[in-house]
Amino acid sequence: MTDHLPAELIDGLRVRAAHPVTGGDIARAYRLDTPDGPLFLKYAPDPAPDLFTREAAGLQILRAHRGGLGVPEVLRQSDSGLVLEWISAGPPGPATDTDFGRELAGLHAVTHPTFGAIDGAPTGYLGSVPIDLRPTEDWPEFFFTRRVVPLIGRAIAAGELPGRARTLAERLAPRAGELCGPPEPPALVHGDLWAGNRMIGRAGAQDAPADRATGHNWLIDPAAHWAHREIDLAMMTLFGGFGEDCFAAYDEAFPLSAGWRDRLRWYQLPPLLVHALLFGGGYGAAALRVLEHYARRPAA
């Protein structure tokens, strides 16, 4: 039965059946069986304002600059959800990780004059948590002042961080430029690149040669914006799922600045804080340890 699904998303698709599938913690997800093949539906009964508009815009810009990466086509969009091209999942191939490293490097080579939104929207989302995407040329301000500091305040208010986290942030504020690393031009980033948002499967008809039809890399569920490219690498290492061959291939294709591995924990602060707000558990304690780690380090 499909009576419970948003009519504006499925009307006219001749849906024969809808099967629940894994789709994350925010939205409900379904495989739609239609005469023209399967489709993917995700929706939320009461989503945050423009949540799916931002996701659709992210998918569209990633698709426009994807290189060899797969990015599902947005077929329908409404305030309550999206209908996307179906991805047929499958096993990785011997070159899947190295391909992904090179392909992600190509995506990050796409630049823009300012950090921030891809489409002028002042607000975006990490998960369902709103973040400031107003444009600026100042990366430390964008990352630390506008993102980390407000998330720390929210986590303290929610009881997920102790008040001394604010004191640590105040101590680190004068060093934000140093801790953010050498200046780089704003890069097009996925923005939420944990392993669950990289799917592996069959290539679409236009995505890759026939000899790479399996083990193909796809990007899903983006929080795309213009940012320092190391935030994607930091998220990739936060929960694992990407082999060392992936990072070696990335660095070969688009060499990383010295000290990038030392900055990974710094750039993991926003996802840790967002996870603390959404899920609680030990994420707040993990974010506090990151703040303590950098506060202990002597200034460069």
Image (cartoon, helix red, strand yellow):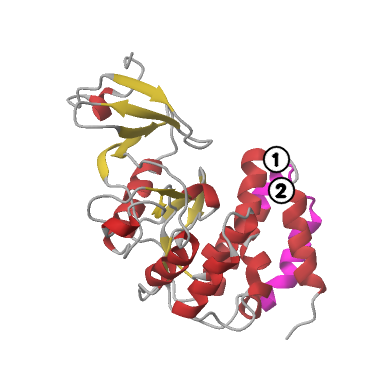
Query: Which part of the image, by quadrant, shows the C terminus?
Result: bottom right
Q: Circle 1 sits on which residue?
A: 280
Q: Is residue 126 left or right of residue 271?
A: left
Q: Name the residue type under label 2.
A: Tyr
Secondary structure character of the magenta stretch overall: helix
- The answer to whether any part of residue 119 appears in the image is no
Query: Which part of the image, by quadrant, shows the N terminus?
Result: top left
Q: Name the residue type under label 1.
A: Gly
- Describe the element under mark 1 as helix, strand or loop: loop
183 magenta-colored: no
171 magenta-colored: yes
Q: Circle 2 sits on which residue?
A: 283
Q: How crowded is mark 1: few (under 14 residues within 10 Å), some or many (20 or more)?
A: some
Toward the bottom, the furthest residue is 300
Q: How many numbered marks have been drawn onto this rendered protein structure?
A: 2
- In terms of depth relative to the viewer, which is nearer, 213 or 32? 213
Q: In this view, does 72 lie to the left or right of 104?
A: left
- Magenta-highlighted residues: 153-175
Q: Residue 237: horizontal and vertical position, in percent?
A: 62, 60
